[in-house]
Amino acid sequence: MKNLVIARRYAKALMLIGKEDGKSENYRIELSGLAELFDQGHELGQTICNPLYDAEGRKKVLEVVIGKLNLSKIMRSFMLLLFEKGRIRFLTDINDFYQKLADELKGIARASVISATELSSDAVEKIRDSLSRMTGKEVKLEVEKDTSLIGGIVTKIGDLVLDGSIKTQLLNMRESLKRGESV
């Protein structure tokens, strides 16, 4: 939980700078690339984040990587700040929060749909259109399959959860029967 608070704080700080200088989309791309590099190049992330290695050596490795990537001055400073403050290990979480903030800035909402069966592309588009009309924003939709739902779909957008799964309906029915209510 503390990690998420820290990540959110740094993502918001970078977003404020991006709004101020009008380069939030550039920072989005750079931060995403760095997070991907740290995740894919597991050894790189381990080397830079591991306190068992000499701090000065780890910083030099980071500076070399930053130099070769031709990053903006702000992103170079941001990465070095993360390193100096011991927050570089939260880079992936910071990136996740920054991506959400950047989407909000562009008027894009993120949503997920979980269904019991594979949804057709037509059904996915209809869901996306409905969510777009409901929110007034463009919707990025992530589709997942979960056979434990038995049937129906569960849609999540922000804090709102629309649960139309048969599994939930059966659970609700069971609870009603336990309380002695008629179904």
Image (cartoon, rainbow, N blue to C red):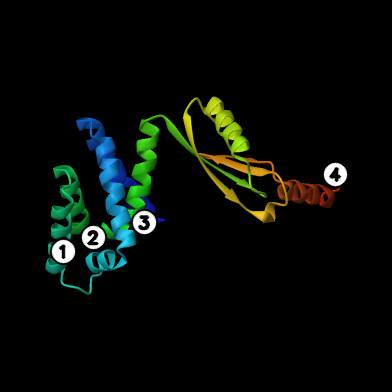
Q: Given the current orientation, which residue lies at the most extreme front position?
A: 121
Which residue position is annotated with label 2? Answer: 86
Which residue position is annotated with label 1? Answer: 61
Mark 4 or 3, closer to the camera = 3
Q: How many marks?
A: 4
Disc 4 from disc 2: Cα separation: 56 Å
Disc 4 from disc 3: Cα separation: 44 Å
Disc 2 from disc 1: Cα separation: 15 Å
Q: Earlier in the sequence, mark 1 or mark 4?
A: 1
> Residue 10 at what x, y percent from top left?
28, 47
Nearer the observer, 48 or 4: 48
* Amino acid beneath label 2: Gly
The reply to whether the C-beta atoms of the residues labelled 3 and 2 are less than 8 Å apart is no
Classify mark 1: residues with Cα within 10 Å, few (<14), some (14-19) or many (20+).
some
Q: Earlier in the sequence, mark 3 or mark 1?
A: 3
Find numbered disc 2 in the image and state the secondary structure of the residue it sits on. loop
